[in-house]
Image (spheres, helix red, strand yellow):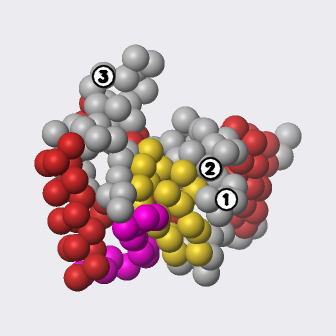
Amino acid sequence: MTEQSSLLLRKQLAELNKNPVEGFSAGLVDDDDIYQWEVVVIGPQDTLFEGGFFKATLTFPRDYPLRPPKMKFITEIWHPNVAKNGDVCISILHEPGEDKYGYEKPEERWLPIHTVETIMISVISMLADPNGDSPANVDAATVKSWMCEQFLMKKLNLRMHSSGHIRKLMHVSGTEQRVIKRLKPS
């Protein structure tokens, strides 16, 4: 499998060099080791990370693509789905199969069809839309949740009082419902 995984990774690297994908760049840490990649993620627009450049490593197992690589940010990044040591916690980088905790569906986890490109697109998406339900960094998830709640309080307060009285709001999320309860006059 080592020779096949090496060929597959070389093919993916050549493809990324030939047709770069917006949002990241990728290359080898050492030209003699196809299993150690260095990536630079460009912070997605309209996020706290916009304009930033975040260096990370992808470490591929010898039986890739049957098993996922490990991703670790080298640049310090504070995000609910990035552990304090930089390890990225995202479903598609979790070992294939059933989740023993029942949180993830098998199709959300690693599948051999994933490539460096699909991994990186998922990571960029994760930066823009963190999963606070399964945080690797609880402190970052708590602050993000609090900040979102503060934003929603302001947004809902404006919406609810914009016409001089509280309007009935339809299709609100659970977080919005908790905020509405706090805003309602007694």
Q: CA distance from mark 2 to mark 3?
A: 25 Å
Q: Amino acid at mark 1?
A: Ile
Q: Residues within 10 Å of mark 1 (few under 14, many from 20)?
A: some
Disc number placed over residue 98 in the picture, else none: 3
Is residue 151 visible in the rendered structure shown here?
Answer: yes
Q: CA distance from mark 3 to mark 1?
A: 29 Å
Query: Which residue is label 1 attached to?
Result: 77
Camera-side mark, 3 or 1: 1
Disc number placed over residue 6 in the picture, else none: none
Residue at x-position 24% and y-position 38%: 63
Residue at x-position 16% and y-position 39%: 1
Q: Could you tell me residue 165's position as x and y percent?
A: 73, 60
Q: Quadrant of the C terminus?
A: top right
Q: Are marks 2 and 1 in contact (CB under 8 Å)?
A: yes
Disc number placed over residue 86 in the picture, else none: 2
Q: For the view shown, which residue lies furthest in the right direction?
A: 186
Q: Could you tell me residue 163's position as x and y percent?
A: 69, 69
Q: Residues within 10 Å of mark 3 (few under 14, many from 20)?
A: some
Comparing 14 with 152, the one in front is 14
In the picture provided, is 84 more to the left or to the right than 54? right
Q: Is residue 68 magenta?
A: no
Q: Which residues are magenta?
A: 19-31
Q: Amino acid at mark 3?
A: Glu
Q: Could you tell me residue 110's position as x and y percent?
A: 30, 39
Q: Amino acid at mark 2?
A: Gly
Camera-side mark, 2 or 1: 2
Q: Quadrant of residue 97?
A: top left
Camera-side mark, 2 or 3: 2
The secondary structure that dominates the magenta segment is loop
Q: Tell me which label, 2 or 1, sits earlier in the chain.
A: 1
Depicted 126 relative to depicted 177: above or below = below
